[in-house]
Amino acid sequence: MKAIVIAAPGGPEQLVLREVPTPSPSKGEVRVRVRASAVNRADLLQRMGVYPAPADSPQDVPGLELAGTVDALGEGVTRLAVGDRVFGLVGGGAYAEYVTAHERTLARMPAGLAWSAAAAIPEAFITAYDAMVTQAHLASGETVLVSAVGSGVGTAAVQIARAIGAVAIGTSRTQDKLGRATALGMRHGLTVGKDGKFADAVRKLTGGTGVDVVLELVGGAYVEESIACMAQRGRLVLVGLLAGPRADADLGAILRKRLEVRGTVLRARPLEEKILAAQTFERHIVPLIATGALVAIVDKTFPLADAAAAHAHVASNDGFGKTVLEVDGP
């Protein structure tokens, strides 16, 4: 099969299209003929050699999410059948014509959903729902602050907040992305300037109360500002570190407000936790996708062979939503 291989740690030019062995499904697994795979920040880090894939995933073929058709079944598979259209997350290897995955980590696609749209959904919506709702217990009537609201996870988060009756405040460095996020359900948008400050503006928007939940996708100095604008007993979930892994946090504020601060990842979780996240996705998110209440935000698509250009586009931070690789073939 054809796959994008990381020839050596480095820049986008290290992504090359090669012929590699086609995988066979193990017990409980299915093989999926991949039709599309979205590009994630984790893929860029893996390419640079600073974020290796889990031990049970291909080390030199990136790709965390996919949409495609089941084409082979491993021993004991009962939930899926050959021909099923599925989408979901894997530990790696989705920049390829075929990939294997445990059958319970995949969900059936709603009818009529395009491959590129389906591939743009799993990582963004599972991450946003898991962090905001499952872990931070965001509820109707509460307010959530979403940093980097124009990212894939950010665009999913504001839609989920709207769907459950919560109020979303988003931050971005460009007014254009705020305008587009407003159309997705964001209630208030704030442009973050070079000083990186936004806490005072958030407190003003909330009448001085602060936000109940922070979906922190940026990290770095944003964490200090996020803590400063949180309400009593607020919950912050750290998902991304685009601004760096260090922050000057006000521990006194965490104590006084009785805040919860936690970090989260999906890729490194054990199989049973990945299955639980996939089941939550299928039960709570996929039905809303089927009705159109939640939609995939595809910024740009590239052929699989142009993975290097896709990585460069994501690294530019110019996009809104997800960048998708389309896989050709019969």
Image (tube, rainbow, N blue to C red):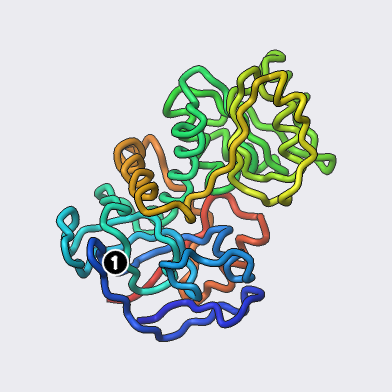
Q: Which residue is mark 1?
A: 32
* Residue depicted at 50% across the width and 38% down the height: 131
Quadrant into which the N terminus falls: bottom left
Task: Determine the secondary structure under disc 1.
Answer: strand
Q: Can I make out residue 289 in this image? A: no
* Residue depicted at 43% across the width and 47% down the height: 296
Q: Can I make out residue 92 in this image? A: yes
Name the side, left or right, on which 192 lies relative to 266: right
Q: Residue 225: x and y, percent?
A: 75, 33
Q: Residue 286: x and y, percent?
A: 32, 42
* Residue depicted at 65% across the width and 31% down the height: 189
Q: How many marks?
A: 1
Q: Residue 275: x and y, percent?
A: 33, 49
* Residue depicted at 50% across the width and 23% down the height: 166
Quadrant into which the C terminus falls: bottom left
In which image quadrant can residue 13 be found?
bottom right
